[in-house]
Image (cartoon, helix red, strand yellow):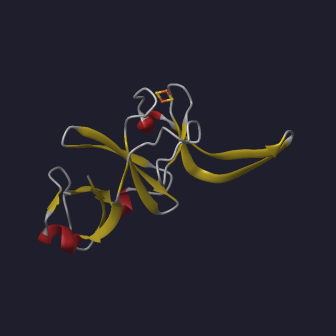
Amino acid sequence: MPSHVVAATAEFPPGTRRLIKVDGRAIVVFNVKGEYFALLNKCPHNGGSLAAGVVTGLLQSTIPGDYAYSRVGEIIRCPWHGWEFDIKTGRSFCNVIKARARAFPVHVEPGQSIVEGPYRAETIPVRVEDDYVVVDA
Ligand code: FES
């Protein structure tokens, strides 16, 4: 599976996202509190752009009137019909059995490794002294 350079870590701060094209596929990469995760930018419900969604948290309730809000910044809500997905896994919270946003492995590589290859970074200047976010897709 080819590895694609997304951005330098210094230019990709927590709470932000990047939309990239990989071999004709749109992939959205998120920085969640310093960790990076990638999902296919196509909601499994009807194809909405997850990159255009709202990042939120997980609201859960075990009994009426009692709820807990957790995992702030780790859930993406599709802008079309509001289905929510775990950014870290692609798991759906609206159709747990059938729907999952496709996830891709993401890792951080030093610039020296990028220069030595084999990575694809056609549009990103690479410096050996920087670290880079890389998605395998
Ligand atoms: S297309 Fe995403 S919730 Fe419907």
Quarter occupied by the N terminus: bottom left
Left or right side of 127 for 94: right
Q: Which of 47 and 29 is in front in this view?
A: 47
Q: Which residue is drawn at 17% across and 49% down?
A: 123
Q: Position of residue 30 (x, y in %)?
A: 43, 51
Q: Which residue lies furthest to the right in this view?
A: 65
Q: Position of residue 18 (x, y in %)?
A: 36, 46
Q: Residue at x 49, y 38 (%)?
A: 98
Q: Where is residue 19 in the image (x, y as percent from the top left)?
A: 34, 42
Q: Which residue is drawn at 85% across and 39% down?
A: 64
Q: Where is residue 28 in the image (x, y as percent from the top left)?
A: 37, 44
Q: How many labels does the image show?
A: 0
Left or right side of 106 for 68: right
Residue 43 vs 86, above or below: the answer is above
Q: Which residue is drawn at 37% across and 38% down?
A: 41
The quarter holding residue 63 reads top right
Left or right side of 63 for 31: left
Residue 41 vs 104, above or below: the answer is above
